[in-house]
Every structure is written in C-alpha cells, then in structure tokens.
Image (cartoon, rainbow, N blue to C red):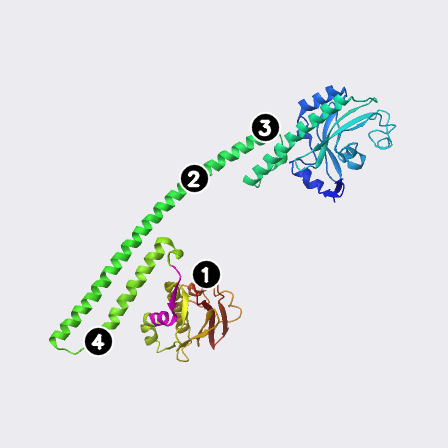
Amino acid sequence: MTINTFGSQTIDRKALIQSYGFVEHLSSNENFLQDSLELAARITGCDIAYISLLDDEHQYILSQHQSTLKTIKVKDSLCQFTIKGEDILVVDNTITNEMTRCLPQVDKADGVRFYAGCPLMNDDQMNVGALCVMDKRPKTLSQTQQDTLMVLGKQIMNTLDNQRTLIKLIKKINTNFKPAACVDLNCLQGELAHLQDEVVAQNKLIQTQKAALEASNEELLNFAYMVAHDVRAPLKTISSIVDIFEMDLQKRGQSYEKKHLNFIRKGAKNLDTLTESLLEYAKSGEDAIQDEIVNLNDVLETVHFHLTETIKSANAELVLPENAFQVCGKNLKLVQLFQNLISNGLKYQDGQRTPKVIIQAEDLKDTVRVSVIDNGIGISQNDMKKIFKPFKRLQTTQQYTGSGIGLATCKRIIDNMGSEFIVTSEVGKGSVFRFDLPKHL
C-alpha cells in the first residue's frame, strides 16, 4: 500500500521509513536530536516539539521534547497534512480549522489548540516525516519563526539522510547488521569505523594467505619441473639405447623386427610429449594450453597407441573414422577425453561378447559431431544422472576397477568447449556418447 505524496507520484512509505533504520517502537530514540527540538520550542514559544516519521498506516515519534506522545494511526495524526506539502503548515486554532478539529488529539478538553509542522524532505525529494511544534493554546507564528523552523527542519533531515547513508554502507559490509539497535549517528559512525578496521584486518589476512599460497604454488611448480626432468631424462636414455641396440644388431648382421623398436620409440616420444604438456598445465592451469587446430584422426591414433595393450589383452576391436577431420581444441584434453571414453567402453563389459568401440565423425557446418559407441553393459535411466558425479561409482571395485571420475572429467572437457555431452544407453546393449567439436578457433 502506498500514499500519494506529490501529484501522481506514489512511494512505498513503509520501505522508505525502514531505510532509516527505525522500527515501530522508538522509545530507545527519545533523546535523539534533543538539542534541535529544544531550539524549535524556544523559537516558536511552544510547550511541545517532536520529530515524527510516517509510513502508510502509522505515525512514529522519533524524538520529542516536553511530551509523551505515542505511535498513532496516520488518519488520527496532525502530521498527515504536513507531509503532503512542501512548505510549513501552521494551524493557529485547531478547534476552528475544518481539517483538524475532529482529530482525537484536538477533540478533547485539554487537547492540542495550536500546531505547526515542517515537512522533512529527503535527498530523493520525498517527505518522510515532520518537525512539529504544538501548544494547548491558540497562537500564531511570525514569518521569521516559520523560516527559522524550516531551516531547522532541513538540518534535521540532513542528519537523518547522513544516518541513512551510513546504514546502507554498514549493511553492505555486514549484511547481518540490525540498524534499529544502533540508530544514533555517533553509534553508526563507531560501527562503521569498527567494520572498516575489520575490513583492513581481513585484507591483511588475505594478503598473508595469498603470499603463503603463492609460495606453495612455487614449491609445487618446482616439484613439477623436477618430476618432468626426472621422467624425461630416462625417456631420452631409452630412445638412445634403442638406437644403439639397432645399430649393434645391424653391425652383427642379425635379423630383427624394426616395428618392435619403433613401437618403443613411439611410446617414449608420446610419454615425453605428455610430460611436457602436463608441465605446461601445472605452470598456469588449463588456460596455459592454447586451443589449436588439430587433426582428429591423429588424436585418435595417439589414443589407440596408448591403449594398444588394453585392446590386445581384451581381444577388443576399436573402429576409427575413415575420413580425416580438423577440429579446434586442446590436444592434451582431446586425448584425455577419448582415452577415458574408449577405456570405459572396453572395461565395462559382461564377458559375453567381444568388446567393441566405434568412433563415428560427421561433418556439420561449423562443428564435427562425434559419437563414441560401445557394446558394453549399458547404463540404466535411474543411473543416468549419477554418472557425471566425480567419484560416483555404479559398480563395486570388485566388479570393475577405477576411481569413478572418468565421465565427470569428459563432461567437464566438453562443457569447457561450449558443447553438450549427450548420453543414450540401453542396459545390456551398450551406450552412445555424443558431442560436437568446433572446427574453427
């Protein structure tokens, strides 16, 4: 519910009043701005002075001088007329005034006979309440008295607006702050200073933790360099020994299978490339590896090579696309993606058929649609939502080995490429994992 304040402009008065940090019972604020109220009483020669705030339904007494006014309904309030205007409202005799004579404060033997109210207009040009003076005898105010009361009202409103600003600032820092418990301006300034000290202390703590984290990352990076060096050095040794061994066999004129030696060389080279890529990843995270145009078949051939022994021991079949496609992505991530999917297809079998994984690739306009099809045990509809949760296993470790993180990793890779990971499956017949790979950088 709102009150029409200026012409057609309507405002939520309840929210407006609450933004100043006051609640319905304002007894804790009875000494607020007492100096201003005493000055208002002396200027006008009135017995009573008070500051009121009005929402849709109630008039609240924020502070008062020489009276014990209570919260009343707006419709019974003299201030209801003050907040509808921009200038001071003076009622010399409330008994003879048509607007005020029937109000409860007036219509009694010792009721109010004189009233003057100055609207309190905030920075948003909205009236939130009034600075009022009252007396039990009819009287009038000179123009000087009225002008002085208006000036005093503006000073009071400045104080209230400053208070409101402080409350907003404090609540930004501390969302649990209860402004009604600390509405005095000095109290608010003290609370803000306290919170500012806390912010400074937290910033110092964050800087300390940041320095510690940077030191820890530096140690991890040094460790990664050491591991990479210790792994790559033996790989170079293996390659060199293979070359020496081959030359020795040639000198002796002994026959040998060159493909076996090339197999060792290729394995060492792939592991060296993988180690170098992992080192780059460790240095700056995923962003350190830039997207590039890669040959999808080269990626699949690398995965095929890595899984050679797995395929051979399972007497499995891996069918790769006949056509070559260029796709955009991180080579290391694409190898990881296909290696996980193919490994799962070969592993999750019931032993009743020859394991088979088929990779299909379809050329679309801006993407290559890839389908990884296996003839494994399949996934039930109830388990479909669980398969992407890290470390969530659908079978026991006695049935199938693994950590349960493979598909979660695959989905994350696809999500980071801006694609969608779609899975269809039928228990006992196998699964299809489908996604689109971009063709352009």
Q: Which residue is mark 3?
A: 186
Label 3: which secondary element:
helix
Q: Which residue is mark 2?
A: 205
Residue at 33% x, 59% y is 278
Q: Which disc is residue 368 wearing?
A: none
**Which quadrant is home to the N terminus?**
top right
Residue 79: quarter of image: top right
**Closer to the observer: label 3 or label 4?**
4
**Closer to the observer: label 3 or label 1?**
1
Label 2: which secondary element:
helix
The earlier-in-sequence mark between 3 and 4 is 3
The earlier-in-sequence mark between 2 and 1 is 2
Q: CA distance from mark 4 to mark 1?
A: 42 Å
**Which quadrant is home to the C terminus?**
bottom left
Q: Which disc is residue 258 wearing?
A: 4
Classify mark 2: residues with Cα within 10 Å, few (<14), some (14-19) or many (20+).
Answer: few
Q: Which residue is mark 1?
A: 416
Q: Is residue 42 magenta?
A: no
Q: From the viewer's perspective, is 194 left or right of 287?
A: right
Label 4: which secondary element:
helix
The earlier-in-sequence mark between 2 and 3 is 3
Residue at 34% x, 57% y is 280
Classify mark 4: residues with Cα within 10 Å, few (<14), some (14-19) or many (20+).
Answer: few
Question: Which of these two is toward me, 17 or 4?
Answer: 4
Q: CA distance from mark 3 to mark 4?
A: 89 Å
Q: CA distance from mark 4 to mark 2?
A: 62 Å
Q: From the viewer's perspective, is 83 left or right of 437?
A: right
Numbered range of the magenta stretch: 290-302
Classify mark 3: residues with Cα within 10 Å, few (<14), some (14-19) or many (20+).
Answer: few
